Amino acid sequence: MAEIPARRTRGLSRLSRILPKAAEKALARHGFPSLELITQWPRIIGPQLARQSRPGRIIRGPDGSTFVIQVDGAAALKLQHLAPEILSRVNAYLGGVPIDRLKLVQTRLARPAPEPAPVNRPVAPQTRAAIEDGVARVKDPELRDRLRAIGTRLAARANAPRRGG
């Protein structure tokens, strides 16, 4: 008869608990330092440069470590000039063995698809009247107009079809 393991798991495990451990192992096999370096890249390097670059792997050699960064062609020169600051930030984030050099690999980075603009439906006359009643007591005309615009936008968004459904 087959032996039953001493510890059993019940039900399903959360993917958020399993995935980081599995991803760390896979990334480490390919020379990537950590999943956090990839996910925290915008905080480390800044949001503008993060949109133009992706962290790559760390190559450890006898003469030091090299950090590979994939970068859009237009931003390569900028990152090259900022190399000492980038090295400092990455080393501070990673701790441990310092990285000595950057290697910038020019490539065409995939851009995230832009989110579609929300589809707003026309606002019902009764809702428009309720918005007008609400803003009628406001004495400042500029504030009244802004509040009216916000109310109309919110009402139109509430009437919009839901995504995925």
Image (cartoon, grey):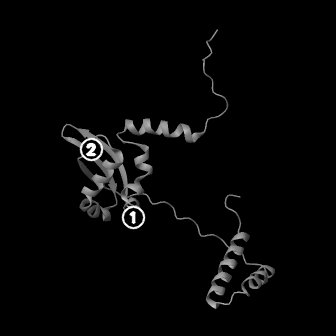
| Cα–Cα gap, marks 1 and 2 | 25 Å
Query: Which sits in the foreground, 120 or 41?
Result: 41
Number of marks:
2
Give residue 159's quadrant in the image. bottom right
Residue 132: x, y in percent?
75, 85
Query: Which sits in the foreground, 117 or 153?
Result: 153
The residue that label 2 is drawn on is 98
Of the numbered discs in the image, which one, if any, rests on residue 48? Answer: 1
Of the numbered discs in the image, which one, if any, rests on residue 19? Answer: none
Residue 153: x, y in percent?
67, 76
Q: Secondary structure at mark 1?
A: helix
Residue projecting furthest to the top = 1
Give residue 165's quadrant in the image. bottom right
Amino acid type of the residue that numbered disc 1 sits on in the rendered structure: Gln
Residue 125: x, y in percent?
79, 82
What residue is shown at x 52% (from left), y 39% (from top)? 19
Asked if the residue under mark 2 is in contact with the one under mark 1, i.e. CB atoms within 8 Å, the reply is no
- Density class for disc 2 (Cα within 10 Å; few <14, some 14-19, many ≥20) is some
Q: Is residue 141 left or right of residue 78?
A: right
Q: Is residue 42 left or right of residue 158?
A: left
What residue is shown at x 59% (from left), y 70% (from top)? 117
Position of residue 116 relative to residue 138, above or below, is above
Position of residue 93 relative to residue 144, above or below, is above
Q: Nearer the viewer, mark 1 or mark 2?
A: 2
Residue 33: x, y in percent?
36, 42
- Density class for disc 1 (Cα within 10 Å; few <14, some 14-19, many ≥20) is few
Query: Which sits in the foreground, 103 or 137?
Result: 137
Amino acid type of the residue that numbered disc 2 sits on in the rendered structure: Pro
Q: Is residue 134 left or right of residue 114?
A: right
Say whether disc 1 or disc 2 marks the residue closer to the N-terminus: 1
Residue projecting furthest to the right = 126
Q: Secondary structure at mark 2?
A: loop
